[in-house]
Amino acid sequence: MNPSNPPPFDLSAWTASQLHTVEAALTRWVACPETSPAPAGLGDAMRYAVLDGGKRLRPLLVLAACEAVGGQPDAALRAACAVELIHAYSLVHDDMPCMDNDVLRRGKPTVHVKFGEAQALLAGDALQALAFELLTAEDSTVSAATQAVLCRMLAQAAGSRGMAGGQAIDLASVGKPISSAQLHEMHRLKTGALLQASVMMGAACGSPTAEGQQSLRDYGAAIGLAFQVVDDVLDVVADSGTLGKTAGKDAAQDKPTFVSLMGLRASQNYAQELLSQSQASLRAGGLNNTAALQALADMLVNRGF
Amino acid sequence: MNPSNPPPFDLSAWTASQLHTVEAALTRWVACPETSPAPAGLGDAMRYAVLDGGKRLRPLLVLAACEAVGGQPDAALRAACAVELIHAYSLVHDDMPCMDNDVLRRGKPTVHVKFGEAQALLAGDALQALAFELLTAEDSTVSAATQAVLCRMLAQAAGSRGMAGGQAIDLASVGKPISSAQLHEMHRLKTGALLQASVMMGAACGSPTAEGQQSLRDYGAAIGLAFQVVDDVLDVVADSGTLGKTAGKDAAQDKPTFVSLMGLRASQNYAQELLSQSQASLRAGGLNNTAALQALADMLVNRGF
């Protein structure tokens, strides 16, 4: 092998190794009956919501961004799990009858179908609290400064000017005409904010230059948007079995999507354009090790996450 | 006036002054249209849930405990508002049809009645995130170490081994026989954890001795329990107009309460006993200025909060 020409990055091997660590940490930290029991069935509902074979895109982004800046793995593992808990809680609440009223998630009954609505509401609430508990654990080796920054980033991305705000726009826009700008804003908040925060929280586990930070911020914005475009495309072209959730729901619910606004072909092209943007952003940042971030973006756009 | 015999503490004046600051801060920080707008009606629902003339017991406990340890007022104000946001979100979610299905709160329609269930769910979620955002704001003068400690305390008190866990026990216990120990455990988590956390977060804004900390922890536990005992008593003896919420609901829903378990008279005596315990705890701690904490405990037990 030519040493000046390194082997291509093996995303499968990298992902398998990272997921091994993430799943073990989630199993240990999420209402574990031995180490952190939760009463009256609440722990069962929380574990069901989290330990369900999700693809863990957000944790992988945290860990990949941490690698790109040579950050602290301990801090990144906590950040990775915290972001996943916020994502998991949002799915539990989104699926509830008063929201999307979905009964299938990742091929299994949703939390409220399995445990009842009240328990699902509480499990979501408790998972959000647990995210911030994980970030600030007393036995953590992470510095207080990093703990505080990670909490701030996560809270902003989850809250009214992030994910929850995007969901409010989504609610308000069902059945109404929506402009391209409004659709972008909705998704920038609804899914983009937490995906970008995943990247930036990984970065905050190290000490990137301002240039490196900007590069990662741009990468995060591009893949955050690409994720939603691809999601809209898959809702049209895939079946429920492949998706692990109910396909064709957007059209059935008359929800505005990139496909309904731009058409299928243009949406597919747009996803590729965003992938190129994300790769260009990474190259501009003077970062050391962006192989995992590059491969994750490619995977996200070309195979769906 | 005899200088060795200071005038009695004026709780009304103290409370009025503190509430002036707290209300102004909440108005500024909760989805304020000028400084921190939230989209699509979400901000309106959040403000409705918070800026509603609540009595602010938890913020007052934070501020009083901070005074007792000579702590930083800036940190205490953020902690006071953060705790109130957690309390407010819990009320919004508790009132929802899948939980208590209550239509009246503090004399007004509940959030889901006014804004719809989906918006109420999101507003609660966003308020929880905002609590952690307030504690870790970038423009804050609070040290990262204090920010991290406050986040940890609040997350633990709100989560599955705190408030959410207590609510899960509450859900599971409706219509079932419950022991005194189980009732105590339910309330220690459901309401006690956040009340005690209010006291301990106030303390964390200063540097109390270990003795002072223990004293405040014991005080917080006693008033946390007293609060629920008094609440159960008031549910029986007061009318809806006085309470600002539907009276007699516990019995109507066959919920276990201190009154149903111990009887009315014994519950009233128990509240007085807990008040004495709280006062004794304060005296044991070598703290400087516990007048506000003492007066708040007395107010809580003898007039209801």
Image (tube, coloured by chain):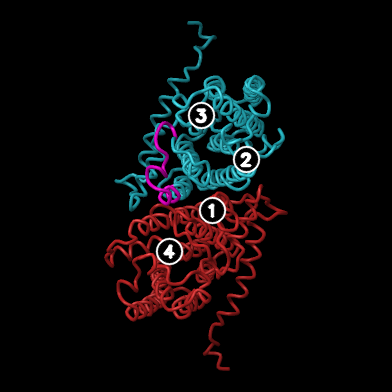
Chain colours: A cyan, B red
Contact between marks 1 and 4 (CB within 8 A): the answer is: no
Chain of the residue under label 4: B
Q: Residues within 10 Å of mark 1 (few under 14, many from 20)?
A: many
Contact between marks 2 and 3 (CB within 8 A): the answer is: no
Q: Which residue is the site of mark 1? A: B124
What secondary structure is marked by label 1? helix
Q: Is the magenta region chiefly helix, strand or loop?
A: helix
Q: In the rendered structure, which amino acid carries the disc numbered 1? A: Gly
Q: Which residue is the site of mark 4? A: B191
Pointer 1 and pointer 4 on the same chain: yes
Q: Earlier in the sequence, mark 2 or mark 3?
A: 2
Q: Which residue is the site of mark 2? A: A174
Q: Which residue is the site of mark 3? A: A247
Q: CA distance from mark 2 to mark 4?
A: 38 Å
Pointer 2 and pointer 1 on the same chain: no
What secondary structure is marked by label 3? loop
Which residue range is magenta in the image?
A105-123
